[in-house]
Structure formats: C-alpha cells, structure tokens
Image (cartoon, rainbow, N blue to C red):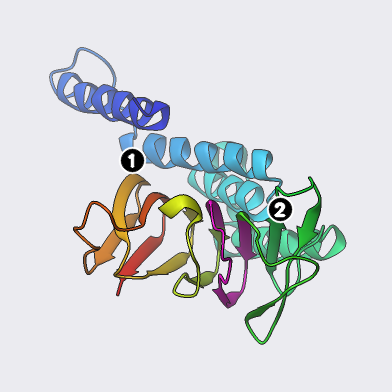
Amino acid sequence: MNKKNLFWGFVLIVLAVYVLISRIGIIPDLPVGKILVSLICVYIMIKGVINRNFAEILIPLAVIGCQYDEVLGITKITPWPLLLAAVLISIGLSLIFPGKRKNGVNITYYSDGNGKTVEQNTVNGKFVEEGTQDGEIVHIENSFSGNSQYVNSQNLLRAKVENSFGQCNVYFHNATLKNGKATIEAENSFGETNLYIPGAWRVQIEQDVALGDVKVYGSGNADMDAPSVLVHAECSLGCINIYIE
C-alpha cells in the first residue's frame, strides 16, 4: 500500500468525521479549510527540504503565513507582499546556490557499464552526449521556467521528472527501453508537467494527487509483448498531462 495515499486517506477521513461531529456541538468548530491547506503546505515543504528546493520550502511557508496573519501579527505584509517576497527570495537563493542546474533544468545520465557518471547537457532543447549514449537513468529537474526536453536514451531504465512553479515538457519518442521495460516518475508542485509517450508502448499509470490533477490523453499498446512503461505521477497543486501518441 502506498504510504502517501494512506496518510492522505487518513487525513481526509479524520476531517470528514470532524465536519460531522462539529455540527452537533460535541467539539468546537475549527477552520477545516485552513487546516487542510496547512497540511498540504507542510507536505510540500517536507518534499522541498528533501529535494533541496527553495521554492517548495518558502512559498508554502508564505501561504501558511497568509492564512494565520492575524495570529502572527503580520497583516500589513499579507497576502501579496509576503508571497512576492517568498518568490523573489526563492529565485535569489536558487541563483546563489544553483548546484548543477542549467537553464532551469538539471539533467543527469548514469551509465552502468563501468560505474562512471556521465552528465547530459542540452542545446536548443536537445541532448548533447558526453562520453556515452547508453544512459539508463535520466533525471530532469525544472523550477521557475518553461522547458522542453527530449529523451534520446537507447537503454532507458528509469526517468525522474521534477517540476515546480514552471512548465516542463518531456518527450520520450526517441527513447528505447532497456529489456523492454522502464519506469517514469513525475513529481509536480505548483506547475504543469507534460509527458509525451509513444503509443507503441504499453503504459501503466499510478497516481498520487493532493489538490492537483493528472490527465491522460490517448491509450497505450494493448499487446502484452510490447515495451512497457510504468508512470508514477505525483501532483500537488498543479497538473500532470500524459499524452500517449
């Protein structure tokens, strides 16, 4: 059982029970909407700490501040000044501590042949190979930008796409799956992620959604012998579109 689904399922059941019993006066009435939004923000912040993503930490924190501005005594700077400051600070920290991010996108290939790690750069949205063409694992990371990336791996085993506060388009039409199987993990927060998957592949989709949406357009190959890909789509306050064509 998916632990995230278990957690959110439990939270929703508790909130539903609270809504019912609060109406009959057993317990005091509390702002359910604020509590739910706060839980989602805390969840995104934890992800941000794990992923070292400044935007996923500061912007949800600002949203929480806007919700409880009267209690915190910060009504003079909410909502827009506080939210704008969170966005600007996130961008500033990302510029100061960019890591290996290039043009808002961080792409890394890992080759299993001799244990070497090989970086992939992009020029005009296309991969420029450095050392090998049989990368098995692709990592694409995008924040505060709009980008289109083309996966050309001829030995693809796993792809991870992380997008926050931007639009990320990833095309898999030029990829070949290792042993006919691969996994695509898409994580989207406050943005839009578009995955373009060949219709010749057999596609299985798992969804993990918190106040977001995952939409699927088209259908994969029904042939059990066709190359198969498992897509795990995790979306918080945004949208993941999966185009199978």
Q: Left or right: 80 with respect to 108?
A: left
Amino acid on which disc 2 is placed:
Ser
Mark 2 / mark 1, whichever is N-terminal = 1
| Residue 185 appears in the figure | no
For the point 42% across and 69% down, the residue is: 194
Amino acid type at mark 1:
Gly
Choose between 172 and 131: the one closer to the eye.
131
User: Which of the labelled discs sits on residue 74, or is there none?
Assistant: none
Relative to 60, 129 lies left or right: right
Q: Is residue 9 above or below residue 229?
A: above
Label the magenta part by its dominant secondary structure. Answer: strand
Q: Is residue 79 left or right of residue 110?
A: left
Magenta residue span: 138-161
The residue that disc 1 covers is 33
Specify the label residue 111 is tagged with.
Answer: 2
15 or 162: nearer the eye? 162
Q: Secondary structure at mark 1?
A: helix
Task: List the single residue furthest toward the top.
Answer: 26
Q: Is residue 150 magenta?
A: yes
Answer with the quarter of the image where residue 243 lies: bottom left
Q: Residue at x 50, y 68 (%)?
A: 175
